[in-house]
């Protein structure tokens, strides 16, 4: 299932004290040594043979298309009635990262979250009337799709201190042909591309106390960084919990993230989210046939959760490259590590045995940070404001183009390169961006070489 660079692995096992080896093992013992187009699709290297069957079954249900009910393939029917995709891999191709549509393309690995001003159930976003909390541009027969999302860009010019020019693309989102009446007044729209799937079980295994210890909501240390946790609703526990997943840390666990995506993206109910995704006022949706109750049973859901939790992190590359070494110093000097925390340690007693007791290098604190008005979507999500975003992990960022054939970054893919992503930073990221603006062309190339190595 996975490819291991045996000479490198032997060196790693023999020299565990050396920092370069530790850093190379970005996912600890789960790390795989593969930099091909399959780099994000491999199982944790420390997975035992008897657990691999669950990974294989989860992989199957992650990649296969769901169909409308009733169907002879009863274990895979229940699609819709409205939906964004027919499979998890439609958005997470090769378990990697989605992108915004190109000219003339439909939204396939990107979606629009919707809400109205105010607070909904359990403190979450307030649903946008009959359009719910997510635009569904596709539907099964006899059920109208909700509308067609569109994005258009305007270029904004800028320049570095050395006079080198750059251009950032500013997106504008609209919804064409809404089928359920006029869009509600005050509608809030937040675009989201699908993130890469690697390392989720490791992120879930970081002790909550460690994450909260890094929070500084009132910036008591005066460094301009005010990371804070999002407290969200845990549907299984029936109480608030720390958010870890999603662009605004609005999901507390891999299981809830997975079950929420099954329902929100494909219309597949589970024991965690039992109701069909038919907001009030969608009569045709409510009358459509279902694939049972629930449409994915607990065993299959557990296998998909296990698969999602144990997708391995690729090893860091080019550790000996002088440019990458210089770039790492630029990264630290600019203060990027204040949010993109390089090192974390997972709990020794975490129930996911592959993830337990690992030293990992995800480059995230999993906290919310105010990124300023230019990146703001204006849509609160639990305790996350309209300008706050969870720090995205950087592990694997240098392989996105290899795996997914594009280099689009940020929550909506507006940044076309790693450098453009830096240039969009505002708010708590403003000082880091300003530091990068002063770098020479060679220094910027070094910084990109470091990020490419992750």
Image: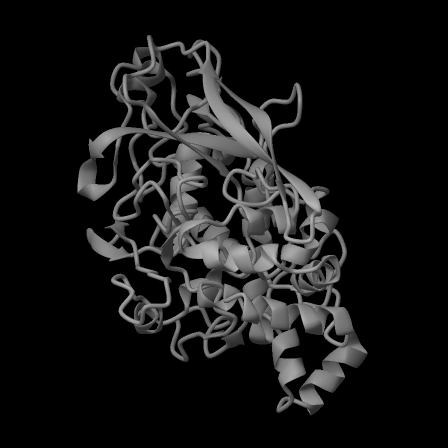
| Relative depth, front residue between 337 and 353 | 337
Specify the quadrant of the image occupied by residue 221. bottom left
Provide residue 178's location: percent of width, then percent of height. Answer: 41, 11
Instruction: Locate residue 40 relative to residue 83 in the image: left or right.
Output: right
Instruction: Locate residue 134 relative to residue 326 in the image: left or right.
Output: left
In the image, residue 421 sits, relative to residue 337, either above or below, namely above
What is the basis of the colouring in this image? one colour
> Going 55% across and 70% down the picture, which residue do you hit?
333
Could you tell me if residue 233 is visible in this image? yes
Could you tell me if residue 296 is visible in this image? no
Quarter of the image with the N terminus is bottom right
> Going 54% across and 40% down the picture, which residue do you hit?
88
In the image, residue 321 sits, relative to residue 105, either above or below, namely below
Provide residue 64's location: percent of width, then percent of height. Answer: 60, 37
Provide residue 400's location: percent of width, then percent of height. Answer: 67, 50
Provide residue 136's location: percent of width, then percent of height. Answer: 44, 23
Specify the quadrant of the image occupied by residue 91. top right
| Relative depth, front residue between 228 and 121 | 228
Extreme right residue here? Answer: 7
| Relative depth, front residue between 32 and 126 | 126
> Going 36% across and 55% down the picture, which residue do you hit?
368
Q: How many marks?
A: 0
In the image, residue 14 sits, relative to residue 314, either above or below, namely below
> Going 45% across and 39% down the picture, which residue do you hit?
374
Quarter of the image with the C terminus is bottom right
């Amino acid at each position: 299932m996975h490819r291991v660079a045996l000479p490198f692995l032997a060196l790693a096992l023999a020299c565990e004290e050396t920092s370069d080896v530790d850093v190379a093992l970005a996912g600890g013992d789960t790390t795989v040594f593969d930099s091909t187009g399959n780099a994000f699709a491999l199982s944790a290297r420390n997975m035992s043979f008897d657990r691999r069957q669950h990974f294989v079954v989860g992989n199957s249900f992650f990649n296969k298309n769901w169909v409308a009910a009733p169907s002879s393939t009863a274990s895979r029917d229940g699609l819709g009635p409205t939906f964004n995709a027919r499979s998890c891999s439609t958005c997470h191709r090769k378990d990697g990262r989605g992108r915004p549509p190109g000219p003339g393309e439909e939204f396939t690995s990107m979606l629009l979250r919707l809400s109205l001003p105010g607070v909904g159930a359990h403190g979450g976003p307030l649903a946008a009337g009959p359009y719910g909390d997510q635009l569904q541009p596709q539907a099964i027969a006899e059920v109208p799709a909700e509308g067609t999302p569109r994005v258009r860009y305007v270029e904004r010019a800028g320049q570095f201190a050395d006079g080198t020019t750059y251009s950032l693309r500013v997106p504008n989102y609209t919804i064409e042909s809404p089928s359920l009446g006029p869009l509600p007044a005050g509608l809030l729209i937040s675009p989201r591309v699908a993130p890469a799937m690697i390392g989720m079980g490791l992120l879930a295994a970081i002790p909550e106390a460690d994450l909260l210890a890094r929070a500084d909501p009132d910036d008591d240390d005066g460094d301009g960084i005010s990371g804070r946790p999002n407290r969200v609703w845990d549907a299984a526990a029936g109480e608030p919990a720390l958010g870890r997943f999603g662009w605004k840390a609005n999901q507390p666990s891999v299981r809830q993230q997975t079950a929420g995506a099954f329902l929100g993206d494909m219309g597949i109910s589970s024991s965690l989210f039992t109701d069909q995704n038919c907001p009030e006022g969608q009569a045709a949706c409510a009358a459509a046939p279902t694939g049972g109750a629930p449409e994915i049973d607990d065993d299959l859901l557990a296998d998909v959760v296990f698969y999602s939790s144990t997708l391995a992190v690729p090893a860091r590359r080019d550790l000996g490259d002088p440019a990458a070494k210089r770039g790492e110093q630029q990264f630290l000097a600019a203060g990027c590590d204040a949010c993109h925390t390089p090192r974390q340690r997972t709990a020794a007693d975490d129930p996911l045995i592959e993830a337990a007791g690992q030293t990992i290098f995800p480059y995230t604190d999993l906290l919310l940070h105010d990124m300023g008005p230019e990146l703001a979507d204006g849509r609160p999500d639990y305790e996350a404001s309209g300008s706050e975003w969870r720090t995205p992990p950087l592990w694997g960022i240098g392989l996105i183009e290899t795996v997914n054939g594009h280099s689009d970054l940020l929550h909506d893919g507006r940044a076309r390169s790693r450098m453009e992503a830096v240039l969009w930073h505002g708010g708590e990221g403003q000082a880091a961006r300003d530091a990068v603006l002063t770098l020479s062309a060679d220094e910027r190339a070094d910084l990109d070489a470091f990020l490419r190595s992750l």
